[in-house]
Image (spheres, rainbow, N blue to C red):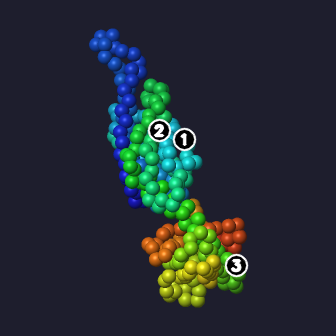
Amino acid sequence: MKRLALVVVVALLAGCSSGCSAAGGGKTEDPVKLRVELTQGRVDEVRHTVQISMHNDGPAKITVERVELQAPSFKGVGPVTVDAPLPVGGLRVDVPVSYGTGVCQGDELKPRSAASHVTFGVRTGDGKLHDVRLPLPDPDPMLDKLLAIDCQQAYLDRQVTLTFGPWTHLPSGWLNGTVVMKRVGFTGAITLQEFVGSILLEVLPLPAREQTPKPYAVLNPGQQEITVPIVVDGERCTPHALAEIKKPYVFPAWLSLDGGPPLYTELKITDAERDAFKPVIDACAAGHTQM
C-alpha cells in the first residue's frame, strides 16, 4: 500500500541503568534512539486513522508498549496500548491510531493545526519503561490536511444535507431510490456536481445511469429541496471485496456553493439504508452479483 510519510523526528534517551563503573567512572548506558514518521494510507483515510511508523536506530532492541497522538486540534484521541518490538537496524514498525475529530472555529475551511506531539512508553532491555515525547513539525502538513477535511465537512453540514430517499426493491435485487439535497443554511446556489457508489455498491442517477451529464442537480436560491432518482446495484460487489472492506457504506459526493470549487462530502447513511442494502450485500456474500 502506498503511504505518504510527512514527518520525521528523533529522540535519544541515555540513562545510567545499572550504575556507574568503578574503574572509569563512566555510565553504563542503555540508550533509546527512536525515529518516527506520521503516515497515512488509503485504508487509513477510510478508517479515520494515521500510522505511527517507528524506527529503532539505537544499538539494542526496544519494545513500544504505549503510543498516543497528542493533537490539541482534534478531540476524542487517547493512548493506545500496543506490543511493538523494534529490532535494531531501523526496520519500520507501524501502529495505527485514531486522530479523532477536528476542532473547528467558525467557517474557516483551511485551518492550521496546533502544535502536536507523539508520546511513547518504551521498554528497554533492562526492563525499564521510558516515557518519550516527540514534537511534530509546526505547522504539520498532514494534521493541517486532516483538520481541513473535518472542518470542511462540518461547514457543509451547516449549509446542506445529502441523504437517500425511500427505497423500492426491484425483482433483480437492485434498489430504486432518490438522493435528496436539502438546504439548511447556505442561501445561494448549491450544485450537486456528482455522487458515486461505495466499493461494494454502485449508485447511479436515472434514467441515463453512466451517461448522465454533470452536474447532477442545482438547488437554486429560494429552492429548499431537490431529488435525483437513482438505482443501487451490487454488480461491483464480490465475496473477496466484501471480506476485505471495513466501511462498505461510504458514498462520496461533490458540492459547489455559488459556482465555487467542488467540495468533497458524503451521503448520509441511516438504519433504513443499511436495511435496504442488506439483501444486495447478502447476495454478494453468496457469490452472486444479482439476485
Give the x, y percent position of residue 49: 51, 53
CA separation in Å, label 3 and label 1? 42 Å
Instruction: Quarter of the image for the C terminus: give it.
Output: bottom right
Amino acid found under the numbered disc labelled 2: Thr
Q: Are marks 3 and 2 in contact (CB under 8 Å)?
A: no
x and y percentages locating residue 157 in the rendered image: 58, 65
Q: Quadrant of residue 183?
A: bottom right
**Residue 119 on image: x %, y %:** 47, 38
Q: Kindly identify the residue that appears in the image at 38 percent across and 46 percent down.
A: 138
Instruction: Pinpoint residue 170: horizontal percent, then vertical percent.
Output: 69, 84
In the rendered structure, find residue 167 and report the number of the disc placed on it: 3
| Residue at 54% over, 41% down | 79
Of residues 6 and 74, which is closer to you in this image?
Answer: 74
Mark 2 → mark 1, Cα distance in angstroms = 8 Å
Amino acid type of disc 3?
Trp
Q: Disc 3 vs disc 1: Cβ atoms closer than 8 Å? A: no
Indicate the amino acid at tag 1. Answer: Pro
